[in-house]
Amino acid sequence: MKTYKPTTPSRRQMTTVDYGALTVSKPFKPLTVKISDRAGRNNQGRITMRHQGGGNKKLYRLVDFRQDKMNVPGRVETLEYDPYRTAFIALVLYKDGERRYVLAPKDLKVGSEIVAAPLAPLENGNRLQLKNIPIGYQVYNVELQAGGGGRLARSAGAYAEVLGQEGKYSILKMSSGEIRKVPLEAYASLGQVSNPDWNLVTVGKAGRSRWLGIRPTVRGKAMNPVDHPYGGGEGRTQRGTKRPKDIWGNITGGRKTRNRKKWSNKLIMQRRPKR
């Protein structure tokens, strides 16, 4: 982590990730695309997610989560920042001349060689089938279905631990503590996602949140009664309602939001522990 001299009140608490390990500041242009900013709006232009908008201009990097170039070794050319995700990404030059962006694991170095194969060597960044990964190894960018592309453990510092094999499934323990089954034929990459210090960042000031595209959040109790169930009253009043509610009056505290008929419920062996 990078800290700063307290030249201003906001600078005193502010921390950022140390980007010293990154090698270039500009992305590989053929693998970038401009995405229009919807600022939390749906296809009708209505705001469906509040507190979004503004922020610095961004270019989207086309990251290969599938990594389906089998048995073709690739050399890591650069380690780069990605404004659309918390982890770092790596530009890989494959033996056939193609370049692709992939999620960079922790401790990956420029010049390292990675490969995707059903029986790839057990080395950091290599991608192989879960049935060929020994118990106790850490994996990331895990597929839920064979060939479907990585879905689990993709954010900064995330990983899943291989606990064992049972029938047609491999048993994984997620960073959250959840234990779930994933098909043995699915692919996963070895290691832990890069930038594990990301959760230690202190934004420090309101302006930096605006740079990130985060707009202000107003407390319900600071509003008027017409605007929120918690609004009104004299001074610092209590909530005034029995149960926690959102701005529209829907119950929020303690209510389960996961669909009881979701197809993957049967694959979850143990839910994450309550905090």
Image: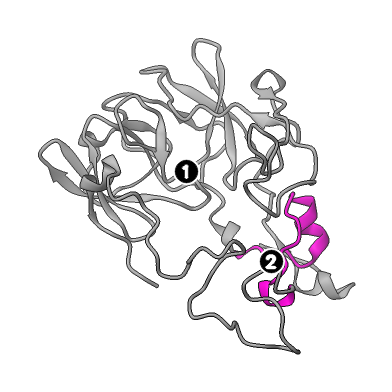
Tag 1–tag 2 contact (CB < 8 Å): no
Q: Which residue does the numbered mark 1 point to in the structure image?
A: 154
Name the residue at 32% across, 36% down: 144
Q: Position of residue 152 (x, y in %)?
A: 40, 43
Residue 179 horizontal side relative to residue 98, left or right: left
Q: Amino acid at mark 1?
A: Arg
For the magenta stretch, what is the residue range?
Answer: 200-223
Q: Residue furthest top?
A: 96
Q: Residue furthest left?
A: 167
Q: Nearer the viewer, residue 255 or 241?
A: 241
Q: Is residue 120 visible?
A: yes
Name the element at disc 1: loop
Q: Is residue 81 visible?
A: no
Name the element at disc 2: loop
Pick whichever of labels 1 and 2 is earlier in the sequence: 1
Label for residue 104? none
Residue 200 horizontal side relative to residue 56, left or right: left
Magenta stretch: includes residue 138: no
Give neighbour class at mark 2: few <14, some 14-19, many 20+ (Cα, 10 Å): few
